[in-house]
Amino acid sequence: MITRFDLAKRWKCSTRKVDRMREQGLLAWVDLSQGRGGRPCVRFRLEDAEEYERQARLCPREGTA
């Protein structure tokens, strides 16, 4: 699992852009807050991010995971 900060760094974009993509349903995400209320603890599966990259023909920065 990776955070929105990790994903933004990987894609060289802002965390807000990652948030918008998630809100628009373009990125699958996981809520790790376990129903505790408040804001969700958002994480992304690396496999889902890599699949999005393939479909969108994105190229992550070399040397990132």
Image: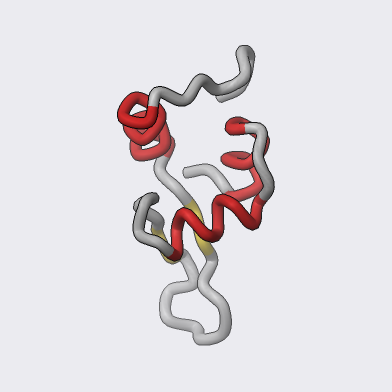
| Among the 4 quarters of the image, the one containing residue 22 | bottom left
Vertical comparison of 62 with 15: above or below: above
Left or right, residue 48 beside residue 44 = left
Left or right, residue 17 beside residue 56 = right
User: In the image, what residue occupies the spot 59% across and 52% down?
Assistant: 17
User: In x, y percent, where is residue 18?
Assistant: 55, 51
User: In x, y percent, where is residue 24?
Assistant: 40, 61
Vertical comparison of 14 with 42: above or below: above
User: In the image, what residue occupies the spot 56% across and 84% down?
Assistant: 38
Vertical comparison of 34 with 63: above or below: below
Color theme of the render = secondary structure
Work out which residue is located at the far bottom of the displayed protein and give it: 37
Left or right, residue 23 beside residue 2 = left
Give the quarter of the figure containing the C terminus. Answer: top right
| Among the 4 quarters of the image, the one containing residue 10 | top right
Work out which residue is located at the far top of the displayed protein and give it: 62
Vertical comparison of 59 with 52: above or below: above
User: In x, y percent, where is residue 54?
Assistant: 34, 24
Closer-to-camera residue (49/46): 49
Q: How many marks?
A: 0
User: In the image, what residue occupies the spot 51% across and 72% down?
Assistant: 40
User: In x, y percent, where is residue 44?
Assistant: 45, 48
